[in-house]
Amino acid sequence: MTEQQPHELVWTLATGAVTSRCLQVVSELGVADALGPERAAVEELAARCGVDADALDRVLNLLADQGVFARSAGGYGHTPASQLLRSDHPMSMRAFPRMMGSPMVLDSFGFLDHSIRTGWPGMAQVEPRGMWAYFETRPEEARTFGEAMMAKAAADVMAVLAAYDFSDVTVLADIGGGRGHLLRAALKAAPQIRGVLVDLPAVIDQLDVPHERLEPWAADFFLDPLPTADAYLLMEVLHDWPDTEAAAILTAIAEAASPGARLLVIENMLEDDQPDTRGHILDVIMLAVAGGRERTVTQLTTLLGQAGFSGAATHSTQGPMRILEAHLA
């Protein structure tokens, strides 16, 4: 591939939001759902979605250039990427571009200059109490956010299970585990495990898929006692928080854990002084929206040590996630 000239590189980066916005709007409109297994003329797609055919054609042209949808003389067809925008796909990603184009994200990034000047998230200018308080009065955005997180985690869960052996775990607590997709998968893979799913009451109250070996545990990990277990999961939880709050979460787990309990921190861990476009994009999202950060293995190990965990070892997965395993000293 020919290396981009500097001015073209700047142009590409400066216009990146155009493609992102096209992906978000097409996801909102349900274009992928409207397109069946056969190619369809753009006029037919536009009629199904209730939009202008010429405008849709121009947007789909741009996405097809990126491998999302396939364009030919016969109209448009699906690609593996556009299939993921279908609502009925088992690993649907439709909610993720919708979330990235939501008022919460866009408004927070509108204050990115404030974040750079102060180190505080732009979200604080939108809702001073933070992201979770923002969702309390915006149930539709909260629902989209939850669906986006599930979509993002779907492939990561499979990669984690392929990379880590849970066969010697008895009680596994998933802290901040949302609807429990990782925990449920671990229970399926290791039938001896009893699982405890810990999240805020508003999340636990919405659980609609019971499991005989899964105990829901409604708690705020900054305020309430956590369950005792011999193993704990923290999947993309610490990166939501600054160091002080992340350390408090780890300390709360240490206070509840059985002697010698293990903790599995699962995140997109940065490498010291190494390129990582995906990780650094996530890091800036955390800066602008959540107030957290992506961390290196060294930074996470330091936090774990402060809470009493030692012997940290990393496990790679087939995806971007890595598993940092430590034990309570």
Image: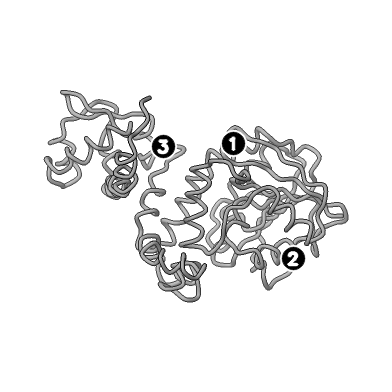
Q: Nearer the viewer, residue 221 or 9?
A: 9
- What residue is drawn where x is 25% and y is 38%? 34
Under mark 1, the amino acid is Met
Task: Judge the density around disc 1: few (<14), some (14-19), many (≥20) Cα neighbours within 10 Å.
Answer: some
Q: Position of residue 178 (x, y in %)?
A: 57, 56
Q: What residue occupies the far bottom of the structure in this picture?
A: 128
Q: Which of 253 and 238 is in front in this view?
A: 238
Under mark 3, the amino acid is His
Q: Position of residue 298 (x, y in %)?
A: 70, 50
Task: Judge the density around disc 2: few (<14), some (14-19), many (≥20) Cα neighbours within 10 Å.
Answer: some
- Which residue does the numbered mark 3 point to in the structure image? 89
Mark 2 or mark 3: whose residue is earlier in sequence: 3
Q: Which of 92 and 207 is in front in this view?
A: 92
- Which residue does the numbered mark 2 point to in the structure image? 252
- What residue is drawn where x is 44% and y is 56%? 145
Check whether the beta carbons of the residues at disc 2 and disc 3 lie within 8 A of each other. Answer: no
Q: Is mark 3 on a helix, strand or loop?
A: loop
- Which residue does the numbered mark 1 point to in the structure image? 158
Task: Judge the density around disc 3: few (<14), some (14-19), many (≥20) Cα neighbours within 10 Å.
Answer: few
- Disc 3 and disc 1: Cα gap in Å? 16 Å
Under mark 2, the amino acid is Ala
Q: In which quarter of the image is the C terminus?
A: bottom right
Quarter holding residue 125:
bottom left
- Disc 2 and disc 1: Cα gap in Å? 28 Å
Q: Residue 304 carries which label?
A: none
Q: What residue occupies the far front of the structure in this picture?
A: 6
Q: What element carries label 2?
A: helix
